[in-house]
Image (cartoon, rainbow, N blue to C red):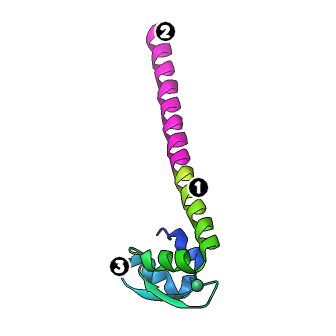
């Protein structure tokens, strides 16, 4: 189950909170890493956690925004490399096919 990046800015305990990664709509409280305030939100709707970071800890919010962007870039890169590998394999199969066809 994927964990939203915003959770890295709160005291997310895997043993205690893992079930919320599955029941993603369920609201639960997390302690902020920077001021120990407890904020309620859910994995699906993380806006309360994001808003707290944005209004109270702007520097960390900017860090979060950067992390979020680079996460998307990494995902796109990964898909692209996967696609390239797939094309390369198709090309190899094509070459083998052509070789066999012209031999026989
Ligand atoms: Zn805080």
Q: Nearer the viewer, residue 61 or 87?
A: 61
Image quarter for ligand 1? bottom right
Q: Tell me the distance, in whole angstroms, between the alpha carbons under discs 2 and 1.
A: 49 Å
Above or below 2: residue 57: below
Q: Tell me the distance, in whole angstroms, between the alpha carbons under discs 1 and 3.
A: 26 Å
Q: Which mark is residue 25?
A: 3
Image point 64% across, 84% down: which residue?
Answer: 34
**Callout 2: SS:** helix
Is 84 contained in the magenta span? yes
Magenta span: predominant SS is helix
**Callout 3: SS:** loop
Residue stretch rendered in magenta on the structure? 76-104
Q: Which mark is residue 86?
A: none
Image point 50% across, 70% down: which residue?
Answer: 4
Q: Position of residue 67 (x, y in %)?
A: 59, 62
Q: Earlier in the sequence, mark 1 or mark 3?
A: 3
Q: Nearer the viewer, residue 31 or 20?
A: 31
Q: Nearer the viewer, mark 2 or mark 3?
A: 3
Q: Mark 3 and mark 1 in contact (Cβ < 8 Å)?
A: no
Residue annotated with mark 2: 103
Q: Position of residue 27 (x, y in %)?
A: 39, 85
Q: Which mark is residue 70?
A: 1
- Could you classify mark 1 by the number of other residues whose Cα lies within 10 Å: few (under 14), some (14-19), or many (20 or more)? few
The answer to whether residue 11 is seen in the rendering is no
């Amino acid at each position: 189950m994927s964990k939203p990046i915003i959770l890295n800015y709160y005291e997310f305990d895997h043993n205690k909170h893992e079930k919320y990664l599955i029941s993603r709509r369920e609201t639960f409280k997390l302690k902020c890493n920077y001021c120990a305030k407890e904020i309620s939100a859910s994995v699906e709707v993380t806006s309360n956690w994001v808003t707290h970071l944005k209004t109270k800890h702007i520097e960390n919010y900017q860090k979060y925004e950067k992390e979020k962007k680079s996460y998307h870039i990494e995902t796109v890169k990964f898909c692209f490399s996967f696609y390239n590998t797939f094309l390369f394999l198709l090309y190899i199969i094509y070459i083998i096919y052509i070789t066999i066809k012209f031999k026989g």
